Image (cartoon, rainbow, N blue to C red):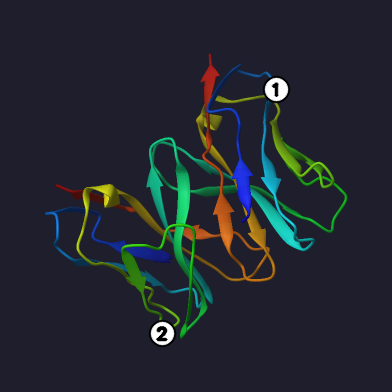
Amino acid sequence: NAGVTQTPKFRILKIGQSMTLQCTQDMNHNYMYWYRQDPGMGLKLIYYSVGAGITDKGEVPNGYNVSRSTTEDFPLRLELAAPSQTSVYFCASGAGVDEKLFFGSGTQLSVL
Amino acid sequence: AQTVTQSQPEMSVQEAETVTLSCTYDTSESDYYLFWYKQPPSRQMILVIRQEAYKQQNATENRFSVNFQKAAKSFSLKISDSQLGDAAMYFCAYRRRRDDKIIFGKGTRLHILP
């Protein structure tokens, strides 16, 4: 079982560059989430999706974009990377409202 | 806006003792779910326990139990017979049914003393 797969695992960006963090799940989950984790700050919700074609902003959406063209994929786009976007990014998916989230292994991103 | 507050950044407990981690949340919703997740050094997130707001009975999973006080908007986690493998970051999370947004607290780092 692959579960939730995130790529890349590590990335260093220069200020102003753009990149896409990939997230794929093979469990046919409708719900998918993107979080960032900064030391001492817990997980902050960036964007989420309750199904293909439906996305919504979370707590910290500025500087990011998402799309959900298929059930399996939920890529996170960073435009014009800034040092404040240095963080660990987690993608997660879930089947139902009271079901647990399945998390990817995270992407460590540094913007220098 | 919904918020989840974990007021204890770090806690320590002696092995085999009991420890309680605090979580409070702010919401005007009546239909929601609460969760505790554990994040060991591997960074993998593991569900510990869940609670539906409409259920009055406190959830229990082996050595883990919650004290859910809906009126006080409190959702504490009790770990009994603490083990070395319980050392981790613990996150409280709130999910509202209306739009499925899931909000996490800042976490509590739990140390287990041998």
The quarter in which the N terminus of chain B is drawn is bottom right
Asked whether the residues under marks 1 and 2 belong to the same chain, the reply is: no
Q: Is residue A20 visible?
A: yes
In the picture provided, is A31 more to the left or to the right than B31? left
> How many numbered marks, from 0 up?
2
A72 and B31: which one is in front?
A: B31
The amino acid type found where label 1 is placed reads Thr
The x and y percentages for residue A91 are 41, 61
The amino acid type found where label 2 is placed reads Thr
**Residue pictured at 14% horizontal, 62% vertical:** A17
The x and y percentages for residue B13 are 60, 18
Q: Which residue is denoted by mark 1 in the rendering?
A: B18
Q: Residues within 10 Å of mark 2 (few under 14, many from 20)?
A: few
Indicate the secondary structure of the residue bearing disc 1. loop
Q: Is residue B5 above or below residue B19?
A: below
1 or 2: mark nearer the eye: 2
Tell me the chain of label 1.
B
The x and y percentages for residue A48 are 48, 69
Q: Which residue is denoted by mark 2 in the rendering?
A: A70
**Residue pictured at 50% horizontal, 78% vertical:** A28
Tell me how far mark 1 sits from mark 2, CA to CA: 45 Å
Q: Quadrant of residue A71?
A: bottom left
Q: Is residue B50 above or below residue B9?
A: below
In the picture provided, is B26 more to the left or to the right than A94? right
In the image, farthest residue toward the left: A14
B53 and A41: which one is in front?
A: A41
In the picture provided, is A6 more to the left or to the right than A101? left
**Residue pictured at 58% horizontal, 27% vertical:** B8
**Residue pictured at 82% horizontal, 45% vertical:** B58
